[in-house]
């Protein structure tokens, strides 16, 4: 910390407060309300200028909610948004998942905002809770920050404002390039399938008709008591799941094994080289081709595994059709259903229509899409690398700012 600065806990120079939620079942607390009431998901904004929800004066009085003044710094305390921070620019109430640091004569709100951005990783790392992180108001009040004189705070804020504006422009540019690359690929893929439909005289099949004729050529994995997590062991026969179709290519994910003895009762779920797997629970529609060197393995209920009659359809073509054919994506998207998460089933996969050109053309189409996909992935990796570099630079600027090492030249990020 720079000489002449003081390290002070937030509680020593500012008051804090947490919000509250009026009883949902009491209509008088909400209907016709004109008092802005923020949820923790609305906090992540340097300038919070509007609210999506409102409560009545009766709701404010009948709950632990309270009005916080403009220029209060808000910190989300619970759940997925824990550690997010923003500056409130109008008088508003919040729910109990938000802590407000009220204005004081010892700090500039924007300075505290930037410091809390800097402190977010350590705050979240210290959060308690199993499924969801929980940052207590007490933790925020006890947080020590370097507190220089107001004039120096203002200088730091001005430099960071300029630097962050430049970083935001650079990030927006990188994200736009990433989105453009993805859209270009999707348009190219659609054109390839349209050209095939117009010129290749494709035959119409259902996926079920493209599989080998023997029973079980399209199968999901064991359900319920057939395979429990408690039966997994440290080594043995591999068990494949959703994580083996990451980024739509086969990858080894979490290590899951069953014993040889357990496998004897599950042999009908064995995956084979060049089978096509597609995820049917959770993130539906991701797919991959089983590699030729696959060891003995079975699939879980989260995957549909298809053993194709390769005299009709190549795995590479069906794989790309699932992923990039407009008809295929539209079908899978429309059929996915489920109250908690999207889900497909084996019947839906079997009934999916596929326009199948001759085998030679299938290979050409698959190769073209693979080549374009490779270019797109490399561009996406470059854009994501640039975005990560910008994130790292942002943290570096914050580190310098609160070590007293920030200069005006930092406002010109490369």
Image (cartoon, rainbow, N blue to C red):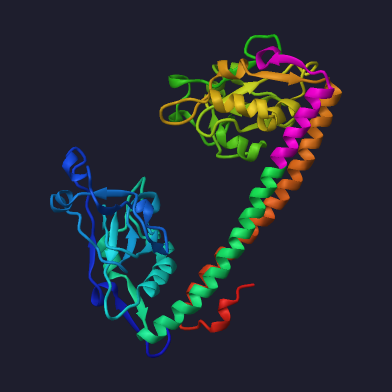
Q: Which of the 4 image quarters holds residue 66? A: bottom left
Q: Is residue 76 above or below residue 271?
A: below
Which residue is painted at 62% across and 35% down in the image?
245
Which residue is painted at 63% across and 54% down in the image?
176
**Observer-nearest residue: 333 or 254?**
333
**Observer-nearest residue: 164 or 318?**
164
Q: Which of the 4 image quarters holds residue 184? A: top right
Q: Residue furthest right?
A: 360
**Observer-nearest residue: 93 or 364?**
93
Q: Position of residue 301 (x, y in %)?
A: 52, 24
Decide if residue 13 is on the left or right side of residue 300: left
Which residue is painted at 39% across and 53% down in the image?
81
Report if residue 392 lies within the magenta region. no
Q: Quadrant of the N terminus?
A: bottom left
In this picture, which residue range is highlighted in magenta? 185-209
Can residue 377 be seen here? The reply is: yes
Q: Quadrant of the C terminus?
A: bottom right
Which residue is painted at 27% across and 80% down in the image?
105
Report if residue 190 lies within the magenta region. yes
Q: Is residue 342 above or below residue 103?
A: above
Can residue 299 be seen here? The reply is: no
Q: Position of residue 229 (x, y in %)?
A: 45, 30
Q: Position of residue 104 (x, y in %)?
A: 26, 76
Q: Position of residue 269 (x, y in %)?
A: 59, 19
Q: Main secondary structure of the magenta part?
A: helix
Q: Is residue 10 above or below residue 134?
A: below
Q: How many marks?
A: 0
């Amino acid at each position: 910390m720079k000489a002449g600065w003081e390290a002070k806990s937030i509680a020593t120079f500012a008051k804090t407060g947490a919000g509250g939620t009026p009883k949902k079942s009491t209509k008088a607390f909400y209907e016709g309300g004109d008092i802005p009431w923020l949820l923790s998901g609305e906090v992540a904004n340097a300038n919070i200028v509007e609210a999506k929800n409102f409560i009545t004066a009766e709701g404010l009085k009948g709950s632990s909610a309270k009005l916080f003044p403009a220029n209060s710094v808000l910190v989300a305390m619970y759940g997925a948004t824990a550690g997010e921070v923003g500056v409130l620019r109008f008088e508003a109430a919040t729910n109990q998942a938000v802590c407000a640091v009220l204005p004081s004569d010892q700090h500039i709100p924007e300075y505290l905002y930037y410091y809390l951005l800097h402190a977010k990783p350590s705050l979240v790392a210290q959060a308690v809770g199993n499924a969801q992180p929980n940052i207590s108001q007490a933790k925020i009040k006890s947080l020590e920050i370097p507190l220089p004189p107001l004039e120096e705070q203002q200088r730091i804020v001005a430099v960071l404002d300029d630097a962050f504006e430049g970083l935001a422009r650079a990030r927006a540019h990188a994200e736009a390039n990433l989105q453009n690359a993805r859209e270009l690929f999707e348009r190219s893929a659609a054109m390839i399938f349209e050209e095939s439909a117009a010129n290749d005289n494709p035959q119409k099949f259902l996926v079920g008709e493209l599989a080998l004729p023997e029973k079980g050529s399209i199968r999901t994995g064991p359900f319920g008591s057939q395979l429990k997590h408690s039966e997994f062991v440290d080594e043995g026969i591999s068990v494949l799941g959703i994580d083996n179709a990451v980024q739509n290519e086969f990858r080894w994910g979490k290590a899951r094994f069953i014993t040889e003895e357990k496998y004897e009762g599950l042999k009908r779920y064995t995956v084979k080289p060049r089978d096509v797997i597609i995820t049917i629970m959770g993130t539906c529609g991701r797919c991959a081709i089983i590699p030729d060197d696959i060891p003995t393995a079975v699939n879980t209920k989260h995957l549909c595994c298809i053993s194709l009659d390769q005299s009709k359809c190549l795995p590479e073509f069906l794989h790309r059709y699932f992923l990039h054919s407009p008809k295929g994506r539209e079908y899978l998207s429309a059929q996915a259903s489920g109250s908690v998460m999207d889900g497909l089933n084996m019947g839906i996969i079997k009934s999916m229509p596929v326009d199948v050109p001759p085998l030679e053309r299938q290979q050409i189409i698959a190769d073209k899409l693979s080549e374009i996909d490779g270019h797109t992935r490399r561009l996406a990796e470059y854009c994501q690398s640039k975005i990560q570099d910008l994130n790292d630079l942002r943290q570096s600027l914050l580190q310098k700012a609160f070590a007293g090492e920030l200069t005006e030249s930092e406002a010109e990020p490369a």
